[in-house]
Image: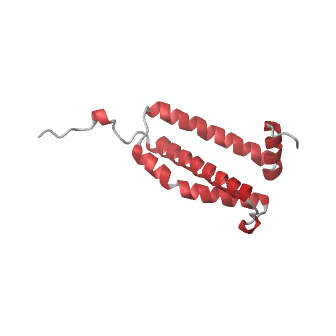
Amino acid sequence: MNQLTLETMIAVFEEIFGRGLWWIMVAVAAAITVLYLYVLIRDRSMSMRKFLWAQLSMPFGAIAAVLYVQAMTSSRFSDIGGPIDVIMLLGIALLGAIGCAILVYTIQSLFRGKSERPISEQPTIVG
């Protein structure tokens, strides 16, 4: 492997996860991204309450992503050998956290709808 190309990365991921599972994961990630964009366009704003719940779910997504990749690669924490392993582990955790937050926000928005009024429509106290 002389160069790191997109085709090389796809081949590596297909080898790790299996061809079918890899492309199912890609399709699910694409579908969640499209739904997230739909929710943002539909609501025309982000709900801070939903965003808070999404942020609170991030550590669970990070842990789940790391454990999932370790299970798929048959590795353990004791197999971490150098700085690149730690960087990869942190990268996987970061992507899992972000993915979980997007998933939680999207699910909340699809099932609960718009729960908050925009600031311009909220009642004001006159006194």
Q: Position of residue 72 (x, y in %)?
A: 76, 58
The furthest residue to the left? 127
> What residue appears at the point 23 percent right and 38 percent down from the top-left corner?
123
> Quarter of the image holding residue 118?
top left
Depth order, front residue of 27/97: 97
The furthest residue to the right? 1
Q: Position of residue 36 (x, y in %)?
A: 54, 38
Q: Is residue 55 left or right of residue 99?
A: left
> What residue appears at the point 75 percent right and 42 percent down from the top-left corner?
23
Q: Position of residue 55 (x, y in %)?
A: 49, 51
Location of the N terminus by quadrant is top right
The furthest residue to the bottom? 78
- Rendering colour mode: secondary structure
> What residue appears at the point 63 percent right and 38 percent down from the top-left corner?
31
Relative to residue 91, is residue 67 depicted above or below?
Answer: below
Depth order, front residue of 124/2: 2
Location of the C terminus by quadrant is top left
Q: Position of residue 53 (x, y in %)?
A: 46, 52
Depth order, front residue of 127/86: 86
